[in-house]
C-alpha cells in the first residue's frame, strides 16, 4: 500500500492542522473530537463549486454504509454572502454528515486549500494519509482502499457496499 501511496503522491508525514469550527447550528466542533471516533474524511467545498455537490453525493452514499468506520466532515468555504445556501443545499441533497463553516477560509488555508473540492483522509493519530485535489471519479475508489487499510471492513457490510 505504501508504494501505491507514493505513486499517487498522497504520502504526507505532516499532521493535520487542528481547528475549531461551527456547524450549521452554530455549535463548535474540533478535529480532535472527530478523530476520537477514528479516521476522518475531511472535504473542503462550496455551494458555488461545480463538482463539489457531485463528490459529496458520492461520499454520502459510501458513508451511509460505513459511518461506523470513519467520520465524513464537509467544511464549507462559502463566504458570508453565500452562507445561507449551505443549509438548503445540504437538505436538498440529503446530506447527513457534519457540515462545518469556514467562511473566513482560515482553516482551509492552513490545509493549503487553494481550489475546490479538496479532500483529506486523516488517520486517528492526526497524520494526513491522503489528499485529493479536484473531483475525479476514481477518488472514491482510492479513498475506500485507504479507509480499508486503516479500519478493515466488517464482514456484514461487504454485501451492502454501494459502488458508484
Image (cartoon, rainbow, N blue to C red):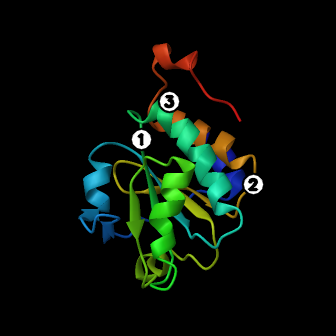
Task: Please state if 112 lies on the left or on the right of 35 as rendered.
Answer: right
> Residue at label 2?
136
Q: Mark 1–mark 3 contact, CB under 8 Å?
A: no
Q: How crowded is the residue under tag 3: few (<14 C-alpha within 10 Å), some, or many (20+)?
A: some
Task: Please state if 80 lies on the left or on the right of 54 as rendered.
Answer: left
Quadrant where the N terminus is found in the figure? top right
> Residue at label 1?
70
Residue shown at the point (62%, 29%) measured from the top left: 162
Helix, strand or loop under label 2: loop
> Residue at label 3?
65
Q: Nearer the viewer, mark 2 or mark 3?
A: 3
- Residue 156 in percent (x, y) is at 47, 14
Instruction: State how far apart marks 2 and 3 are (Cα).
Output: 21 Å
Nearest the eye: 148 or 85: 85
Indicate which disc residue 30 carries.
none
Helix, strand or loop under label 3: helix
Counting labels gives 3
First reached walking from the N terminus: tag 2 or tag 1: 1
- Residue 25 in percent (x, y) is at 29, 64
Amino acid at each position: 500500500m505504501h508504494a501505491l501511496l507514493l505513486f499517487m503522491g498522497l504520502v504526507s508525514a505532516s499532521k493535520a492542522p487542528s481547528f475549531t469550527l461551527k456547524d450549521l447550528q452554530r455549535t463548535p466542533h474540533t478535529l480532535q473530537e472527530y478523530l476520537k471516533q477514528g479516521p476522518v474524511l475531511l472535504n473542503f467545498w462550496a455551494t458555488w463549486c461545480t463538482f463539489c455537490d457531485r463528490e459529496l453525493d458520492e461520499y454520502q452514499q459510501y458513508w451511509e454504509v460505513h459511518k461506523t468506520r470513519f467520520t465524513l466532515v464537509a467544511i464549507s468555504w462559502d463566504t458570508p454572502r453565500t452562507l445561507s445556501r449551505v443549509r438548503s443545499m445540504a437538505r436538498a441533497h440529503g446530506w447527513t454528515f457534519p457540515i462545518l463553516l469556514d467562511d473566513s477560509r482560515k482553516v482551509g488555508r492552513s490545509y493549503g486549500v487553494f481550489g475546490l473540492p479538496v479532500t483529506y483522509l486523516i488517520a486517528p493519530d492526526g497524520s494526513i494519509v491522503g489528499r485529493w485535489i479536484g473531483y475525479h471519479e476514481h477518488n472514491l475508489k482510492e479513498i475506500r482502499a485507504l479507509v480499508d487499510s486503516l479500519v478493515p471492513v466488517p464482514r456484514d457490510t461487504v454485501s451492502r457496499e454501494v459502488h458508484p
